[in-house]
Amino acid sequence: MSLILRPLLAVALVFVPSHARADGFVSPWIGSAFGSGAGIRNGVPPITTDDGQTLVGISAAGSVGIIGGEIDFGYGRSFFGDTTLYGKNTMTTLMGNVIVGVSKAR
């Protein structure tokens, strides 16, 4: 083999694609709340969200065979502002999913 072909063949063998396998993931996230609350109801003034409230959280998923699960947790401090009708407040969310997937056998 020539002096150029041998290194090119070695590089090609290193970068040969293989099967992708994703059995799970962890994904932290950060976001921002925007918008406003509802109007006056039963004589109570509206609660509005201050634009720009920071939200943080984490999502994770995994699977074993064809069954898996996913969970998402989120947290927002002072979601409705620093002072509201009911005092200080936070927002916490927790959501889960069941995943059923069929793998393609080769």
Image: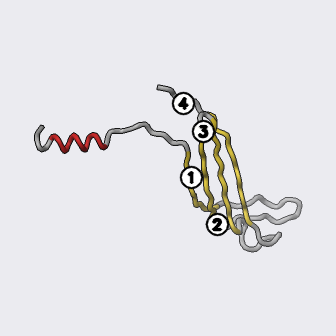
Question: Which residue does the image show at 89% across and 60% down from the upper left?
Answer: 42
> Which callout, 2 or 1, points to the residue nearer the camera?
1
Residue that mark 1 sits on:
26
Residue 13 on image: x %, y % = 28, 40
Alpha-carbon distance for marks 1 and 4?
21 Å
- Residue 13, placed above or below residue 30: above
Residues at discs 1 and 3 in contact (Cβ within 8 Å): no
Residue that mark 4 sits on:
103
13 on left or right of 55: left
Q: Earlier in the sequence, mark 2 or mark 4?
A: 2
Q: Which amino acid, by three-letter code, is at mark 2? A: Gln
Q: Earlier in the sequence, mark 2 or mark 3?
A: 2
Residue that mark 3 sits on:
64
> Which callout, 2 or 3, points to the residue nearer the camera?
3
Q: Which amino acid, by three-letter code, is at mark 1? A: Val
Q: Nearer the viewer, residue 62 or 39?
A: 62
Alpha-carbon distance for marks 2 and 4?
41 Å
Q: Earlier in the sequence, mark 1 or mark 3?
A: 1
Residue that mark 2 sits on:
53
